[in-house]
Image (spheres, helix red, strand yellow):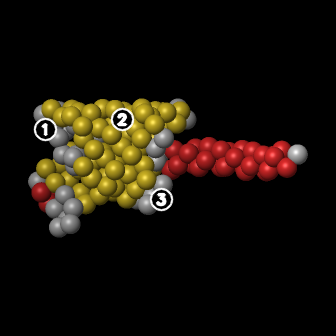
Amino acid sequence: MKTIALIIPMLFFFAISCKAQSQTNLYDAQEITGVWNWQNDNGKHITEIKLNFVDSNENELQGNYCSVFFNGSKVDCEELESSYCINLSRTEDNTYEGTFQSFSHGGTGTLRIIYDAINDSITLDVLTSEGVFYLPQHTTFNR
């Protein structure tokens, strides 16, 4: 009887913990959308990324980036809201992988974006690339 009395509270605690974790992951996934910014220490290079879910599907992200490098002498932007140069799929909680394309310079590649809920930031890693583009290779973006 003592064993059952101890197991019931433990099961209740476990069930609540699982539900809280599930809600946290959903909340984190929703927080990855929006506008993210980066600039290097001396301000010569600036990039903005805008991410949205595809049709409210939290497993698919699409977006655009706009980079201004070398104090404005190199610009890499997609200005049409209907065209997306970043297409990502969720690979695990808060992690998305997919492709990007530079509409301005024609470069393409694959990338990974990881959302950090604690710091409300994303880390972007270019995994493979070909051609010319102005997207930082390994960078943390903030709001």
Q: Residue furthest front?
A: 2
Above or below for 71 versus 91: below
On the rendered structure, is 15 left or right of 8? left
Residue drawn at point x = 34 percent, y = 32 percent: 98
Q: CA distance from mark 2 to mark 1?
A: 20 Å
Who comes first in sequence, dot 3 or dot 2? 2
Mark 2 or 1, which is nearer the eye? Answer: 2
The reply to whether residue 18 is in sight is: yes
Q: In the image, what residue type sits under mark 3?
A: Ile
Tell whether label 1 touches label 2 (CB within 8 Å): no
Cα separation, mark 3 vs mark 1, equals 34 Å
Q: Secondary structure at mark 3?
A: loop
Observer-side mark, 3 or 1, equals 3
Q: CA distance from mark 3 to mark 2?
A: 21 Å
Per the image, the residue denoted by label 1 is 132
Residue 89 image-quadrant placement: top left
Neighbourhood count class around disc 1 (C-alpha, 10 Å): few under 14, some 14–19, many 20 upward: some
**Which residue is located at x 12 percent, y 57 percent?**
70
Q: Which element type, helix, strand or loop, lies under badge 1?
A: loop
Is residue 12 shown left or right of residue 93? right
Q: Residue at x 46, y 48 (%)?
A: 32
Is residue 127 or residue 55 the one in the foreground?
Answer: 127
Between disc 2 and disc 1, whose residue precedes? Answer: 2
- Of the numbered discs in the image, which one, if any, rests on residue 118? 3
Name the spot of residue 110 as percent of width and height, x first: 27, 33
Position in image of residue 90 (x %, y %): 44, 34
Q: Which mark is residue 97?
A: 2
CB-based contact (under 8 Å), mark 3 and mark 2: no
